[in-house]
Amino acid sequence: MKVTSFQKKSPLKEECEDAYFQNETAQIYGVCDGATPLVSFQDEDGHNGAYLASHLFQAYFEEADAHEPLAAGIVKANELLGKKMDRYGIDRTQRHQLWCTCIAAVSITDKIIHCAQLGDCMIVAKYKDGRAEVITTDTVRGISERAKIKRERDRMSGLPVPQESHFLNPAERLLYNRSMANTPDGYAVANGMKEAAFYIQTRVLNRSEIEALFLCSDGLFHPDFSLVETAQCVWTNGIEAYAKQLERVEKERGIRPDDKTALIIWLHL
């Protein structure tokens, strides 16, 4: 088995809010993407909530035991995240103040590959027969559209929701979107809420059928390619070449670059 990692900080950020882990002893691998905070909190070392969330998960899984199910590990790390926010006096009733991270992880045994995910970190599998499949669902995708539908539904129910002109302000849209974390109409994320446990996606793959895995944060999503096409580009040409091509497209089109993190796992060399 061969594992290749890639990470590049967005030039628009002071520090990389992504993290990844390679626990060779337990054969656990994953990518985390901290959600850029909407508040100005920093700890004594100058780290924001996104960095703290993603790196807490990184630290947890770097020491995780192979016998602990991935989903249980995510729940435990999420509980630790909540406790850490409490130590810093974060008001956890205000969801926009919560430290958040998405995660996609795999635990590999001789026969089985366990997958677990929250948010928009993604996993793509390459089968020995040539097929490629996206293993996870991006629950962040379309959140703004779902939020608009929910606001309209709530207004019709008589709830006090500002008119849509209020949400033309991007900051107000983001605040509202964060309020939908770990709800049926919203998106899944590790942010200390116990409800996150209900939204963890899991999947089991037969290792003997899988040739390679691609795990990535959303900073590596391509505006023109499907995620399968992205993974195939990476498997064929390498992550460095793909990332450079994506950066050229982002620059040409004025797309704001995000942190970029990936793990490429070849199971059969």
Image (spheres, rainbow, N blue to C red):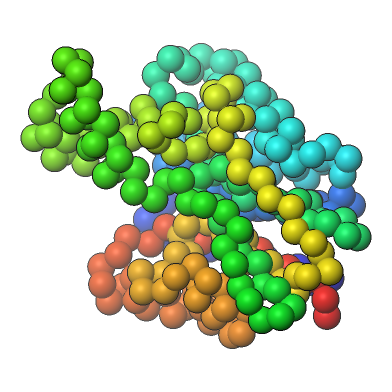
Task: Please provide percent x and percent y for residue 229.
Answer: 50, 76
Q: As drawn, is 53 to the left or to the right of 207?
A: left
Q: How many marks?
A: 0
Would you place residue 7 above or below residue 36 in this image? below
Task: Please provide percent x and percent y for residue 68.
Answer: 83, 37
- The reply to whether residue 174 is in sight is no
**Which residue is situated farthest in the bottom direction here?**
237
Task: Please provide percent x and percent y for residue 202.
Answer: 66, 45
Question: What residue do we see at 47% from left, 57% from top?
Answer: 218
Question: What residue do we see at 62% from left, 50% from top?
Answer: 104
Quadrant of the rendering where the N terminus is positioned: bottom right
> Viewer-proximal residue, 223 or 149?
149
Would you place residue 233 above or below residue 162 in this image? below
> Viewer-proximal residue, 18 or 65?
65
Would you place residue 89 above or below residue 134 in this image? above
Question: What residue do we see at 27% from left, 76% from top?
Answer: 252
Question: What residue do we see at 51% from left, 14% from top?
Answer: 89
- The reply to whether residue 147 is in sight is yes
Q: Quadrant of residue 181?
A: top left
Task: Please provide percent x and percent y for residue 165.
Answer: 8, 35
Q: As drawn, is 110 to the left or to the right of 216?
A: right
Quadrant of the rendering where the C terminus is positioned: bottom right
Q: As drawn, is 22 to the left or to the right of 140?
A: right
